């Protein structure tokens, strides 16, 4: 599972070769994922890079991580959405299409 760091999910977008070259082992149990990500994204700062790096996440690959899969299931349960089975053509196409969608920013309520 991701060890309390969103960056562990971002690490899942890199190939095994890229992770090995940066001397990063298992991304599913990675501690100090931010530090590991800095080896792949020089001078990584969450406030500067997280949104851009998050947009590059391969949803189908991230769903292989138990913690990300749990997030997907929990969100589906809350929203009533149906989750395509992992590994199906619909699941892969749906995940990739979802990762390409643009989400409008949420604006804070003005109290009215």
Image (cartoon, helix red, strand yellow):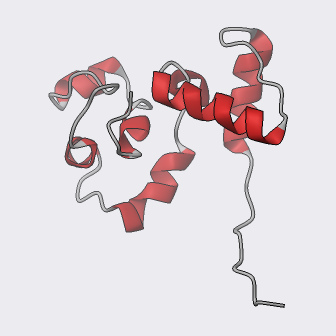
Q: Is residue 38 left or right of residue 73?
A: left
Residue 27 location, x and y as percent? 31, 27
Residue at x 39%, y 67% (from the top left corner):
48
Residue 41 vs residue 59: left or right?
A: left
Measuring 66% from the left and 28% from the top, which residue is drawn there? 73
How far across and down, in percent of the image, does residue 34 sit? 26, 49
Q: Measured along the vertical axis of the image, is residue 11 above or below residue 63?
A: below
Q: Which residue reaches farthest left? A: 23
Kindly identify the residue that appears in the image at 66 percent across and 34 percent down.
74
Query: Going by the picture, which residue comes out furthest to the top?
Result: 88
Residue 26: image location, x then y, percent = 27, 21
Q: Quadrant of residue 32?
A: top left
Is 75 located above or below residue 27 in the figure? below
The percent position of residue 11, horizontal first and vertical second, equals 36, 35
Q: Is residue 93 left or right of residue 20?
A: right
The quarter of the image holding the N terminus is: top left
Residue 22 or 71: which is nearer the viewer? 71
Residue drawn at 75 percent across, 23 percent down? 93
Quarter the C terminus occupies: bottom right
Vertical comparison of 77 with 26: above or below: below
Residue 18, quarter of the rendered image: top left
Q: Nearer the viewer, residue 47 or 111?
A: 111
Query: How many numbered callouts?
Result: 0
């Amino acid at each position: 599972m991701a060890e309390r760091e969103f960056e562990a999910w971002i690490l899942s977008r890199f190939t095994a070769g890229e992770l090995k070259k940066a001397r990063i082992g298992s991304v599913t149990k990675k501690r100090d994922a931010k530090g590991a990500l800095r080896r792949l994204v020089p001078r990584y700062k969450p406030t500067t890079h997280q949104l851009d790096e998050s947009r590059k996440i391969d949803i189908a690959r991230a769903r292989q991580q138990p913690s990300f899969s749990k997030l997907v299931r929990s969100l589906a349960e809350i929203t009533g959405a149906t989750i395509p089975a992992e590994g199906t053509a619909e699941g892969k196409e749906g995940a990739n299409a979802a990762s390409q969608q643009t989400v409008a920013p949420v604006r804070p309520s003005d109290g009215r």
